[in-house]
Amino acid sequence: MESQKVTSNDFAKARRWYQDACGTALAMDLIGERWSLLIVRELLLGPRRFGEIRGALEGLSANILTQRLEGLEKGGIIRRRQLPSPVNAQVYELTKWGAQLEEPIFALSRWAAGSPAHDVTLPLSNGAFMLSLKTMIAREPARGLSIDLGFRVGGEPFRAAIVEGGLVIERRDPAGAEVIFEGVPTLLAATFYGPLPLTESIREGRVAVTGDLAAGQRFVDLFGLPRFEND
């Protein structure tokens, strides 16, 4: 089902947070309600069912998710699609325009990662962890690497490749990858963004790694959190 085109008149008829012609204000009208941007985040790696979105976002009720999905669809950011047989399930996906939110979301994530209030021990969805890698990879050092990467994050399969210093991620079986990382999101985050070498993280049970351990360490070395600077 295609979303209907949204117009300024549509928003004039609805409750708006701001009465401001600035694009920033309109962006907040479109995605500024609680949970909206996180729902978009969960769709950046592809379509998701209602239950998959809700399961990824701890504390989000079915009622609020329904409201936010309706609002995002009305805003032209997402659309509903029926998967064909034998799946026969409805999924939500980003529109072409909605997918352009990827870079703004990544920019916000990089900015917030430098805050002293950033608590890496809080819950993290499987997709959010994978997107953190795409966000935080050190692009220049990554340009010299070519590693076939696999992940099992909270039991969910992902495959990734370094392309021109960035990370391309797909939801698919990691079997056969050069190196495969497996674990739960919070402990994987501690592995990639913490100070310990990969062998120590393995020894402490934060991550399981199969395949080329040296290649895995080279990949982990591409990640770190920015320092808070406020001078």
Image (cartoon, helix red, strand yellow):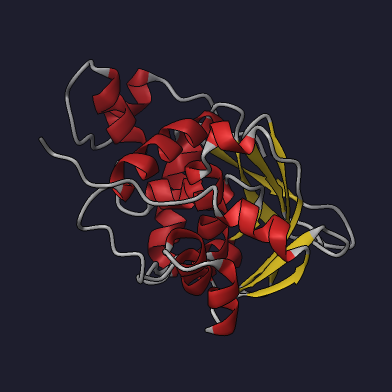
From what the image shows, is residue 28 above or below residue 12? below
Name the residue: 58% across, 83% down.
203
Name the residue: 13% across, 39% down.
230
Total marks placed? 0
Name the residue: 57% across, 36% down.
141
Residue 133 appears in the picture as rendered? yes
| Of residues 157 and 175, the one drawn nearer to the viewer in this rendering | 175
Whether residue 175 sits left or right of residue 110 in the image: it is right
At which x and y percent is residue 64?
Answer: 38, 61
At which x and y percent is residue 86?
Answer: 89, 62
| Of residues 173 and 136, the one drawn nearer to the viewer in this rendering | 136
At which x and y percent is residue 164?
Answer: 67, 29
Whether residue 224 sits left or right of residue 147 in the image: it is left
Direction left: furthest residue? 231
Whether residue 118 sits left or right of residue 230 in the image: it is right
Direction bottom: furthest residue? 204
Direction top: furthest residue? 21
At which x and y percent is residue 121?
Answer: 35, 71
